[in-house]
Amino acid sequence: MMSPRPLTDFSRLCVHTATTKPWNIETAMDRYAKAGIAGITVWRDTLEGRDPNTVGRQLADSGLEVVSLCRGGFFPALSEAKRREAIDDNRRAIEEASAIGAPMIVLVCGAAIGQSLEDSRSQIVDGIAAILPEAEAAGIKLAIEPLHPMYADDRSAINTMAQAHEACDRLDHPLVGIAVDVYHVWWDDTLPRQIQNTGELDRLFAFHICDWMTPTRHLLTDRGLMGEGCIDLPGIRAMVEATGFTGFNEVEIFSTRWWESDQDEFLEKVKETYLRHT
Ligand code: ZN
């Protein structure tokens, strides 16, 4: 297994606001900046009830680099009306990303129970194609995040790196690429080749880290802190960096267990395990 150069500082550390879910956006940006963390990925729920332009100014003042907006997607639906609603919502996401200074939107692509995964995948490609003009006008990248197959029923019909590549091939656009999240793809025996392909095709847009707990007690909210689980984080980081990727290592941990803990102490643990186990 490859081993990457050790991480020695926080210049490439980005934290997702969902990782510290109990904090609102103002607290998150304040604490991340004070902790010396370089980047922030903003989840859309933190913008509710706020003017995204105001949040954008606060983020600019914080000194944090805004890495991405999470999340767009959820394109498939049984009715055309619902698919149109999803496209409109993604257009709003592009406006929000522009307002907060995020150069990229991460797409959790969606799936609809009642139709085949193949049909859902076609609707995903159509949905992304529909918002590409707005993405182009705003210069916003769209990162398709393959989700673990346990989410194939209603969260994403794109479950492997190969399927993400296929969607990118069909769209064939420089603003469309892939977000590699270790939680979703660590088990895939073709991962080395798939990651290498993202590099060759200039498609590696984002790298998300956390760990896989054994046993996993909840499908959505039992992710581990780096080093708590079974994912070979240094090995996957080595593959990612071998492509020439110099972007952020984004910590994305949905964990009821950690959300119930003191968030300042948790953030210190994030920093510590980032250096030690990533
Ligand atoms: Zn992710």
Image (cartoon, rainbow, N blue to C red):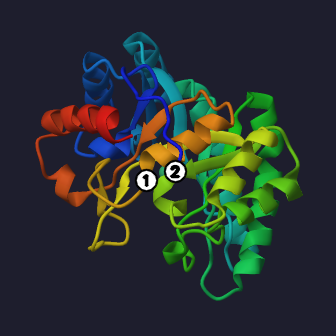
Spot occupied by residue 83 in the image (x, y as percentages of width and height): 71, 67
Spot occupied by residue 263 in the image (x, y as percentages of width and height): 17, 39
- Residue at the image point whose x is 20% and y is 51% from the top: 259
* Residue ranking furthest to the front: 1
- Residue at the image point whose x is 61% and y is 63% from the top: 74
Asked whether the viewer can see residue 29, the reply is yes
Q: Is residue 224 above or below residue 267?
A: below
Report the front residue among 74 and 145.
145
Check residue 202 in the rendering and tell me which mark sits there, or answer none: none
- Amino acid of disc 2: Met
Asked whether the viewer can see residue 88, the reply is no
Residue 67 in the figure: left or right of residue 159: left
Residue 168 in the figure: left or right of residue 48: right
- Residue at the image point whose x is 76% and y is 54% from the top: 128
Check residue 232 in the rendering and tell me which mark sits there, or answer none: 1
Spot occupied by residue 264 in the image (x, y as percentages of width and height): 16, 33
- Which image quadrant is residue 168 in? bottom right
Residue on which the image places disc 2: 1
Report the front residue among 122 and 87.
122
The reply to whether dot 1 and dot 2 touch (C-beta < 8 Å) is yes
Q: How many marks?
A: 2
Spot occupied by residue 12 in the image (x, y as percentages of width and height): 46, 25
- Amino acid of disc 1: Asp
Residue 97 in the figure: left or right of residue 64: right
